[in-house]
Image (spheres, rainbow, N blue to C red):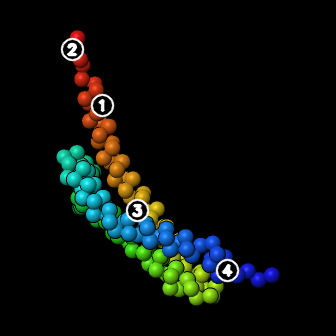
């Protein structure tokens, strides 16, 4: 019994991959700038982050710590995640129409690559938000520990 990857791909995956990755890719391109600017303003331009950088620099004086390097990394990953999603969607309508197993394999592989980049982007966004939320928690604890006068 021979297994036909293309038949499974054509019946179950191609149209879903096209619509899903087209939606994700265009959404990421649209909100990428907003995400980056907001994280820059709320995390990287704040005094608590500058203090954090100074502490890290003191701990490792041999290495120069770049202030915006995590933000640059996030920008790149979001760009490549959006681009790979749009490439994946395009492949579904071009190469995905070739009735060969190797073509289906390439289309499915492009989806796996796009998903990997999307998960990596989500992890980086979470790490940056964790820094921000940690500072919010510290500030809210400081405010709530002030004694109230009766």
Element at badge 3? Answer: helix
Q: CA distance from mark 4 to mark 1?
A: 58 Å
Residue picked out by circle 1? 141
CA neighbours of label 1 inside 10 A, class few (<14), some (14 to 19), many (20+): few
The extreme top residue here reads 150
- Would you say residue 116 is visible in this rendering? yes
Q: Earlier in the sequence, mark 1 or mark 2?
A: 1
Q: Residue at x 24, y 58 (%)?
A: 37
Residue picked out by circle 3? 121
Toward which corner of the image does residue 125 lie, by quadrant? Answer: bottom left
Q: Residue at x 32, y 62 (%)?
A: 31
In the rendered structure, find residue 149 and report the number of the disc placed on it. Answer: 2
Q: CA distance from mark 1 to mark 3?
A: 30 Å
Q: CA distance from mark 3 to mark 4?
A: 32 Å
148 left or right of 20 in image: left
Of residues 16 and 81, which is closer to you in this image?
A: 16
Q: CA distance from mark 1 to mark 2?
A: 18 Å
Q: Is residue 49 above or below residue 2?
A: above
Toward which corner of the image does residue 109 lie, by quadrant? Answer: bottom right
């Amino acid at each position: 019994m021979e297994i036909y990857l293309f038949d499974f791909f054509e019946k179950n995956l191609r149209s879903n991959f096209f619509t899903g990755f087209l939606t994700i890719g265009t959404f990421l391109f649209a909100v990428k700038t907003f995400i980056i600017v907001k994280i820059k303003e709320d995390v990287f331009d704040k005094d608590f982050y500058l203090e954090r950088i100074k502490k890290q620099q003191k701990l490792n004086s041999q290495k120069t710590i770049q202030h915006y390097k995590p933000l640059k990394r996030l920008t790149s990953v979001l760009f490549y995640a959006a681009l790979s999603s749009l490439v994946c969607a395009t492949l579904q309508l071009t190469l995905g129409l070739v009735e060969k197993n190797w073509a289906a394999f390439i289309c499915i592989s492009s989806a796996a690559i796009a998903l990997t980049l999307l998960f990596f982007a989500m992890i980086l966004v979470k790490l940056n938000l964790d820094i921000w939320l940690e500072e919010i928690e510290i500030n809210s604890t400081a405010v709530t520990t002030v004694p109230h006068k009766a």
